[in-house]
Image: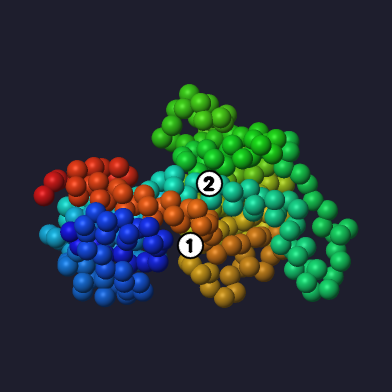
Amino acid sequence: MKILISEKIDAICPKLFQEAGFEVDYRQGLSPAELVEIIGDYDGLVVRSAVKVTAEALAKGAPRLKVVGRAGAGVDTIDVDAATKAGVLVMNTPGQNANGVAELVLGLMLSLVRHIAVGCAALKAGRWEKSRLAGTELRGKTIGLVGFGAVGRRAGALAQAFGMTVLAYDPFLNDEQITAGGAQPRRLDDILRESDFVSLHLPKTKETANLIDRAALDKMKPTAALINCARGGLVDEAELAAALREGRLAGAALDVFAEEPPAAGHPLLALDNFVGTPHLGASTAESQVNVAEAVARQMIDFFQNGGLVGAVNSITKR
């Protein structure tokens, strides 16, 4: 079996493939056209979040290409429908970076309520703005989690450690499952209306694109803040910027954007009540090892034993 690793990944990934007797090519920085040109030479493809696996690439990869492994959770850069039609299995590694992302959620919340980023910038510019930057505490506040998978559950547990009330909405879980996960179940509208912080933990799909639009933002408290460390495109960023400018929302923090990196002059980047980071959720040493090891082990198991751990689509065996 021949595996193409198309993005930077921890060394444990190619090491495990090689120990299992697989041939590995490690080629970073492939353009879409270059990927189309060579993908048919491989049985498996490993991607992170940068390389787009298009319908054209998947069609060109067949019949040899059998599996695309995503070292991470989101598969919005992979045309899953086209993969299914081409008979290519797509698998991801959910939960492997959950703690790293969840800790960033809490870090962004603290940065907002304690004005960490603004205070640091002012201090470096020679300004001592102690009186202007009085903040609030997380204890006693309510966080509403939109999506209650591995990251949402971990974020909820960390929030509880700060003394917060945790609400959760997930269309794929019933109330008993949410309660068992340590949160109070709510409808989406109730999450928006009741929460001091709304944190998104959803994949990007046709149904969730721009889920947080003008109507959703208007349901939130003017004292509330929005956090998105999930996927870019879940939030209408222009409407979010308007809500922050006009005082209809107190704060927001995004680790992910509809366009990455965001264009120069993006309206959010000029606002003091906005904190942004460059897609750092899974960028911890621990998360990088976890996803690299998981995707290799899952793909090896698929080739050797027909294992389907992490499969996000269903294919006819070929």
Q: Name the residue located 78 percent from the left edge and 72 percent from the top edge.
A: 124
Residue beneath disc 2: 99
Label 2: how many Cα within 10 Å (few below 14, some 14–19, many 20+): many
| Position in image of residue 314 (x %, y %) | 22, 44
The residue depicted at 79 percent of the width and 68 percent of the height is: 122
Q: Is mark 2 on a helix, strand or loop?
A: helix
Does 210 sit left or right of 57 as displayed?
right
The number of numbered discs placed on residues in the rendered structure image is: 2
The percent position of residue 275, horizontal first and vertical second, equals: 65, 60
Specify the amino acid type for callout 2. Answer: Asn
Closest to the observer, 37 or 290: 290
Mark 1 → mark 2, Cα distance in angstroms = 23 Å
Q: In which quarter of the image is the N terminus?
A: bottom left
Q: Which residue is drawn at 54% across and 35% down?
A: 168
Give the image quarter of residue 171: top left
User: Which residue type carries mark 1?
Assistant: Ala
Q: Mark 1 points at which residue?
A: 258
Q: Residue 246, can we see it?
A: no
Q: Which mark is residue 192?
A: none
- Kindly report which numbered mark, 1 or 2, lies closer to the viewer in this rendering: 2
Q: Choose the circle earlier in sequence order: 1 or 2.
A: 2
- The answer to whether residue 71 is left or right of residue 127 is left
Name the element at disc 1: loop
Query: Looking at the picture, how far across and down is residue 101, in whole percent?
Result: 53, 50
**Which residue is at the front of the view, 16 or 25?**
16
Q: Residues within 10 Å of mark 1 (few under 14, many from 20)?
A: some
Q: Would residue 118 be visible to someone looking at this image?
A: yes
